[in-house]
Amino acid sequence: MDLRQIFPHPIIQGPTAGAGNTPAEVAAVSNAGALGSLACSLLAPDLIRKQVEQIRALTERPFCLNFFVQGLPQPNSDQVAHAIELMKPLWSSLGWARLPLPSKWCEDFSAQFETLLELKPAVASFTFGILSVEQIERLHAAGIFVIGTITHVDEALAWQSRGADAVIASGVEAGGHRGTFIGEQIAATLSVAELVPAVVSAVNIPVIAAGGIMDGADIKRMLALGAQAVQMGTAFLVCDESAVNEAYKQRLLTAGNHPTRLTRAFSGRYARGLVNRFMDTLEAVESELPAYPVQNALSGAIRAEAAKRSETELMSLWAGTGVARARAMPAAQLIATLLAEMEAH
């Protein structure tokens, strides 16, 4: 299927879980002829319903709901205690005598999935894992176009074999969490320019390029490599409609040549962000931290308090390698700017 049958312009606004993704932004992008995406992975079913209602009040165009494919973890108390001790330099720096514990490790994906079927968006995308054939068939029966996120060819073939309609080829440059689900996360090292042509030649479903894509020239390069569209996360984090913490937004807009790095420190799963004290403090021990979502939940109180204090050195500043080229403007203006830049190249 040609993606242009769903959205005319080859641009998807990347879902940014926990980083300012709003119904207003999703609707603005879709109204501009691209595809807006709502990050649902950290939202309870009732909140997903509420935000989808808000999107539908603002647009009649297609939009995407994005989820993390994951089970409910059962960490042992020793793992949790060890992680809390490793993070002590961070939480004690906030003046705390102990780290507040989360009420739950994550949302229940099975409950989110049933909510997705009920809401019937035009598109759903998935990260971290892979759906079963039966799950994909249920989505298709509800009229939902299914996109899987991949970091190497084997994963693209796996999604295709189970019936996915398209894949997002996420290069190592991408901000936020990696989508690896076959093999070691740290072994998925292909750049988007290497990954896209390899995946295009391996599958017969549309390929969407993601990772370090910031302007119209970048989009044209990805389309020339065979991608049908691109997904851009960092570029939309600084849009006017983004509800990202203001201190975080300023760090993105003033990033310059400040490095980004992949880290397990915040969440227990490799994710790319601006290097800060939180990352540096745990760099030597990050392999000892529990896997996502346990570490993500344990560090949540630190990051939430840091956000309240505008203390960016203790926040997860997710960003891709192209962050220095991020531009603050309304989302619709960004789409128009990208299209004009594509025309110029």
Image (cartoon, rainbow, N blue to C red):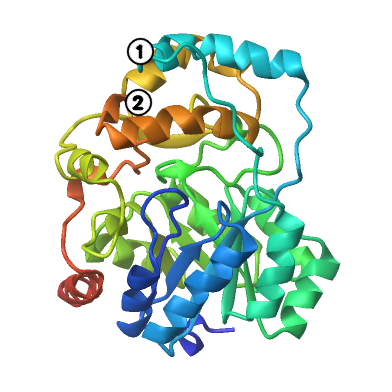
Pointer 2 local density, CA inside 10 Å: few below 14, some 14–19, many at least 20: many
Quickly name the residue at label 2: 314
- The picture quadrant where one finds residue 44 is bottom right
| Residue 158 seen in this snapshot | no
Q: Earlier in the sequence, mark 2 or mark 1?
A: 1
Residue displayed at 65% across by 24% down:
290
Q: Nearer the viewer, residue 69 or 101?
A: 101
Quickly name the residue at label 1: 93
* Residue 38 image offset from top left, x and y in percent: 47, 65
Identify residue type, mark 2.
Leu
Identify residue type, mark 1.
Ser
Of the 4 image quadrants, the one containing the C terminus is bottom left
Q: Are marks 2 and 1 in contact (CB under 8 Å)?
A: yes
* Structural distance between the alpha carbons of marks 2 and 1: 10 Å
Of the two numbered discs 2 and 1 in the rendering, the one whose residue sits closer to the viewer:
1
Pointer 1 local density, CA inside 10 Å: few below 14, some 14–19, many at least 20: few
Circle 1 sits in a helix, a strand or a loop, which is it? loop
Q: Nearer the viewer, residue 92 or 109?
A: 92
* Residue 284 image offset from top left, x and y in percent: 49, 9
Q: Is residue 88 above or below residue 179?
A: above
Q: Nearer the viewer, residue 329 or 111?
A: 111
Q: Is residue 216 above or below residue 318?
A: below
Q: Image check: 68 left or right of 265?
A: right
* Residue 296 image offset from top left, x and y in percent: 56, 34
Circle 2 sits in a helix, a strand or a loop, which is it? helix
- The picture quadrant where one finds residue 139 is bottom right
* Residue 249 image offset from top left, x and y in percent: 23, 46
Q: Image check: 212 left or right of 168?
A: left
Of the 4 image quadrants, the one containing the N terminus is bottom right
